[in-house]
Image (spheres, coloured by chain):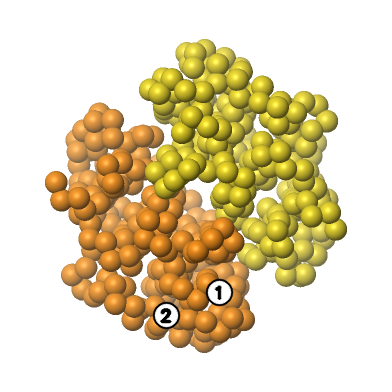
Chain colours: A yellow, B orange
Amino acid sequence: MSGKPRLHYVNARGRMEPIRWLLAAAGVEFEEAFLETKDDLKKLQTNGDLLFQQVPMVEIDGMKMVQTRAILNYIAGKYNLYGKDLKERALIDMYVEGLADLNELISSNFFQPADKKEEHLASVMDKAANRYFPVYEKVLKGHGQDFLVGNKLSRADVQLLETILLVEESKPDILAKFPLLQSFKAKTSNIPNIKKFLQPGSQRKQPIQEKDIPRLMQIFH
Amino acid sequence: MAGKPKLYYFDGRGKMESIRWLLAAAGVEFEEEFLETREQYEKLLQSGSLLFQQVPLVEIDGMKMVQTRAILNYIAAKYNLYGKDLKERALIDMYVGGTEDLMGFILMFPFLSAEDKEKQRAFIVQKATSRYFPVYEKVLKDHGQDFLVGNSFSWADVHLLEAILMVEEKKSDVLSSFPQLQAFKRRISSVPTIKKFLEPGSQRKPVPDDKYVETVRKVLRMYYDIKAN
């Protein structure tokens, strides 16, 4: 029993990826137990390990935590990545929830019918460029600091970097009109824990490949 | 300038209802501005008040807060409804996550076709009775206390009561196999601030009707079809 957090999920990004990012940014080593088959999920369910019978589940500090937001809130709170007071937390929460909405839109592309995927992706990229990224560009411009909130690294910065990289996978020039986000991306990527996480061989997961889709679908459906 | 929080949303439940519940439970008086026309919404958009161009918006403590979860977190923490430490907060967050998922199935209900409504009703009841209610029933049974977390009234209790009442609107006897939840419902409904909110004439909103759906579609220009789960 290592005492390290233990993540239970499939070997893919999904809803666990922001948790991996946040632990990595906090410099916390973690283990992963991958669900490979439907039986692996059933076993966790029948053991009573999953409060609402769903993953993600993270074993941390004697708790079996579920619900992505709950897990992220706990990690951020524990490792001082959640601002210094209620008002900083309010800003961080607003920024993080906006990014979560964008992330959700991007993941939902997977479930679009084949003939609608391209159109859907274009509309999501449009939202990234016109609704979401301008907000963060403006925040950075407004205070001129390196980090989104309180002149200090927080979960909002980690999640913004994660989202920028995700959007760039679909549209590499998405930051063309956002000079401050470009320098934010460069600076934040260089923070030692994050730099390490961005290197090959880390626990960061890659985009889903076509060949993996049937296996992953079968675990959950 | 009253100093009271001011809520900007439609005259209906939607994503703002949990916020109304929490403010009411905390005994905080609030004002509301209802979006009725597209023009009002466009004016709000142009004012730059909506960080991501969406409502809910709550003006509170000098901030223009958006994102339902951010607003709820702030209110819960400010009014001591968020547990006494990180571990209690973790439990509250997990429980609220569950009731939020459950109420999420109901959120889209008014926008469904008549046929899909029947399917969704069955889906909601099935999830409530097999996945969600058993969890809270067990939590209460295991510790035998009046409240879900830390023997103290919290956001988790408010949110669960809201969810129970919403599911009961879809099936009135849905709590028949859950004696702990029946007692919980009675207890929390009697908390003075909540009792007041449950009385006619409060700012609690009724079950969404066609007029609400029409207003939302018109104001947001949201004419696409919504599918059931």
The amino acid type found where label 2 is placed reads: Lys
Q: Distance between the residues labelled 1 and 2?
A: 12 Å
Badge 2: chain ID: B
In the rendered image, which quarter is residue B63 located in? Answer: top left
Residue B42 position (above or below residue B104)? above
Dot label at residue B22: none
**Camera-nearest residue between B130 and B60:** B60
| Label 1 chain ID | B
Point 64% across, 58% down: residue: A66
Categorize mark 1 by other alpha carbons within 10 Å: few (<14), some (14-19), many (20+).
many
Look at the numbered disc 2 and give the secondary structure of its residue. helix
Asked whether, in this view, residue B223 is left or right of residue A115, the answer is: left
Is residue B159 visible to us here? no
Mark 2, residue position: B185
In the image, is residue B133 above or below residue A211? below
Residue labelled with disc 1: B136
Residue B139: x and y in percent read: 59, 76
